[in-house]
Image: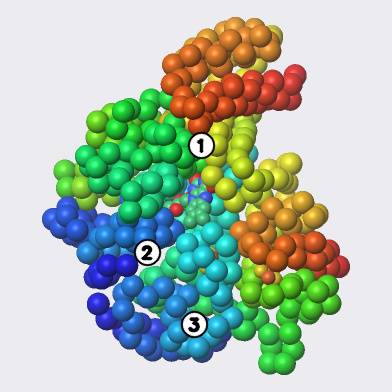
Amino acid sequence: MDVEILLRVDGKEHRLTVDTRTTLLDALRERLGNTSPKKGCDHGQCGACTVLMNGQRVTSCLVLAVAGEGAEIVTAEGLAEGDELHPVQRAFIAHDAFQCGYCTPGQVVSAVAMMREAQAGWPSVVTEDLDADVVVLDDREIAERMSGNLCRCAAYANIVPAIAEVARP
Amino acid sequence: MKPFRYERADDVASAVATVTDDPRAAFLAGGTNLVDLMKMEVATPGVLVDVRHLVSHDIEDLPDGGLRIGAGVSNSMVAADRRIRRLYPMLSQAILAGASYQLRNLATAGGNFLQRTRCVYYRDIATPCNKREPGSGCSARGGHERDLAILGASEACAATHPSDMAVAMAAVDAVVHTQGPAGERTIPVNELLRLPGDEPWRDNVLERGELITAVDLPPLAVAANSRYRKVRDRASYAFALVSVAAAVEVADGLVRDVRLALGGVAHKPWRAFTAEQALLGAPATEENFHAAAEAELAGARPLPGNAFKVPLAANTIVSMLRALTEEAR
Ligand SMILES: Cc1cc2nc3c(=O)[nH]c(=O)nc-3n(C[C@H](O)[C@H](O)[C@H](O)COP(=O)(O)OP(=O)(O)OC[C@H]3O[C@@H](n4cnc5c(N)ncnc54)[C@H](O)[C@@H]3O)c2cc1C
Ligand code: FES
Ligand code: FES
């Protein structure tokens, strides 16, 4: 069943007609040609499709495009300022934090949101003092908070240091 | 996915009316469970009524000292709420132990209770499953039994309820508010989700079209000294094999109050009333913790593939009571 929707992606507005079955991930990739969010599992199990939706990281494969109508979407592509890469993107390159690179855009978007969540004082399941005001992003916290992004190449040993460099300058 | 119509209702009453009147219609909240099941054609609704904007996104203080969580509050916001972290830490921890940040940002308090089982046969339309297709049989017994129930299962179904949040909600005696075709009502979480019996397709007691609007946490002093522990096949981003929500208050060496609920062991969050009764007023000793855990699990009927869950659940109960009472000392 076709519906007309408005998507705001990386600061640009797009009007398009989609079948109600279209996920946000498919709308971004197939309709808008933004292939930075990747389709790993299509079931919420890998995080390759992670984008920001109204500032929060979400798995775009489980969001119906029609339900995301009007929301502010940011993809890995939209994190850079023109040719100037986001600090997290630069850190991934500096630390060689990928092999095939398929999970990387999802990892990068997720890491950016993760640091904002920590700044807002959100705890994780490994946070010792749930009542603490300040979250210290040690390696254990980073690993737990990034566990929604799988890396089939197991580049974790470089992903965590890349994120740590930005999280604990 | 089967084709469907998507609707955003203007108010709760019309959302309820649409789903009540059309057997093919379903509510959509975060979609993290329903959209997943629709992709596999395990769920095939013809109409989706998006309710996320209709139900409250706030957590309010109640006059009695409890809290009211709107059904539309994301799992992330419940876990991060300062009051919940301080007054009901096991609820924050339970939510944080489930899924991932990406999923918890989408998932809602209402949808979390109503997520369907992760039994691999339920999720595979090529295999018989009494829950998905009444009367077709159960493929799980004698198959992949690792995730199945050890308590309260029936011949027809041994699936488990996958929610972590609901386990902590059961431990604190949370109460769900609903609005349905017959009006508004409240349902204790411990009665919302049901055992399979011979109707395993019914996960809960809600009527068709009945919408969860909020969930209340009653004031509960013992909950301030509480924790959630989840045992699973990998350290994060995996469903529970066994989980325990525990709260305990000790005075003069005696158990003054206690709440225990188990996840991963039954078709619903398993409130350990037997163990609680055994512990109330008793000396807070390792021996009594063991006896209480064993009394609770005396009724366990494990299968060959999940018998490990019986000692695992007992040991997890004991180690949590030990940790919580040592901290209180
Ligand atoms: C990869 C993965 C891993 C996960 N791991 C965990 C885990 O470890 N622990 C855990 O607890 N959960 C886990 N989850 C499940 C997740 O927590 C649930 O999918 C989520 O809580 C469902 O909420 P939702 O708002 O997205 O519901 P939806 O998917 O929108 O809806 C779920 C069901 O509830 C109904 N519904 C929704 N809202 C209402 C309402 N207000 N009133 C009446 N009916 C309603 C819908 O019709 C549907 O039947 C995982 C999910 C995925 C995909
Ligand atoms: S593609 Fe969305 S989580 Fe894997
Ligand atoms: S770099 Fe290959 S999947 Fe992560």
* Residue at the outermost front position: B142
Q: Position of residue A36 (x, y in %)?
A: 59, 81
Q: CA distance from mark 3 to mark 2?
A: 18 Å
Q: Position of residue B36 (x, y in %)?
A: 41, 60
Identify the residue under disc 3: A29
- Distance between mark 2 and mark 1 Cα atoms: 25 Å
The answer to whether mark 3 and mark 2 are in CB contact below 8 A is no
Label 3, label 1: how far apart the Cα atoms are:
37 Å
Q: Residue at x 48, y 81 (%)?
A: A28
Residue shown at 67% from the left, 50% from the top: A123
The scheme the figure's colours follow is: rainbow
Residue B167: mark: none
Q: Give the label, 2 or 1, closer to the camera.
A: 1
Q: Amino acid at mark 2?
A: Lys
Read off the chain for label 1.
B
Name the chain under label 2: B
Vertical relation: B188 (above or below) B300: below
